[in-house]
Amino acid sequence: MDLVADVLEISGVRGTIGARIEAGGSWSIPVTECTAAVLHVITAGSAWLETKHSSPQCLELAVGDVVLMPDGPSHMLGSAPGTGAPVADPAMAARALETGEVIRLGSQPARTRILTISYDCDHTVRTQVLGALPEVVHIRGDQGEAGFDDTVRMIGRELRRPLIAGRAVLNSLVDVLLVQLMRAWLPTQSGHRGTWLGVLEDPLVRSAMERLHAEPAQPWTTTTLASALGVSRATLSRRFPAAIGQSPATYLTQWRMDLAAVRLRKTQDPVESIAAAVGYQSAPAFHRAFARSHGVTPGRYRAERREDSCRKRV
């Protein structure tokens, strides 16, 4: 079982092509008021990125580089750091992020080309991967796993020579790019303990979580889970929370509620069927657990998600 893929799917992470920057000479552009994760791909030339969040950074980005900011913090892209270059209109930049417009900055011909991608998810789902990442993830063009640089080049080709169904191809490629970025970054890092990513640092906890994901309806307890893994209850009780910051029982309840939320949002299945599928034989017990997790009853949650969906389509 691929736990990272499991969580990306259940949290509904999807990438969308945003602004396409073509710049030459002296230029800068602010990226502000982002509610989704933001990723920049340098498909030609170079640029500087400056952030002003809790850990300010100034990064030089070269062709093929990818930088991801999971929390979408306000930041600045430009030809050089702190040079006082002409600043693009923030409103224009915000609009381009949503519509995928081309923004031409500075003097022409353009030497630098940047693709901006936004990754959003179902924020009601509590099991998230992006939220466990640091404020800035920077992968250099020559640092990625096999195929990483190929994906960047494919994105660049699609942008330079648009063909039929180009947006569908690009949206698929940007989802692939996020996974490849995580493949390249995760093996080089440590210190994830206490977050969801801590599961990747402890084989026993990973095996335990795979059991919970594969069979969420089973009446697991810490004792039965430890027995299935061939370890003592004390060992699992110590290592599971040390790795991810939650006990097995707490994580199982959270995972069940996330699975239920997706079923409520995406299907017409009766609440009783959803309850049984995630391990609750008693509908009232499921109602209480879901309300504690999401703040509303299952029926209210389903109605609100449908109302949100209708508003987005209008």
Image: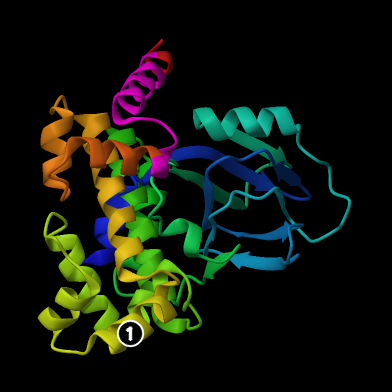
What residue range appears in magenta? 292-310
The residue shown at (67%, 68%) is 60
- Above or below for 63 versus 298: below
From the image, give the main secondary structure of the stretch colored magenta: helix
Is residue 17 part of the magenta span, yes or no? no
- Above or below for 64 versus 36: below
The percent position of residue 58, horizontal first and vertical second, equals: 73, 66
Q: Does residue 122 appear in the picture of this structure?
A: no
Q: Amino acid at mark 1?
A: Asp
Q: Where's the N terminus, which quadrant?
A: bottom left
Q: Choose between 119 and 296: the one closer to the eye.
A: 296
Residue on which the image places disc 1:
202
Q: Choose between 2 and 63: the one closer to the eye.
A: 2
The residue shown at (68%, 42%) is 108
Q: Residue furthest top?
A: 314
Name the colour scheme: rainbow
**56 sits left or right of 272 in the view:** right
Asked where in the image residue 148 lies, by quadrant, the reply is bottom left
Q: Residue furthest right?
A: 84
Q: Choose between 282 and 93: the one closer to the eye.
A: 282
- Above or below for 119 versus 265: below
Q: Does residue 7 appear in the picture of this structure?
A: yes
Q: Choose between 301 and 181: the one closer to the eye.
A: 301
The percent position of residue 171, horizontal first and vertical second, equals: 34, 41
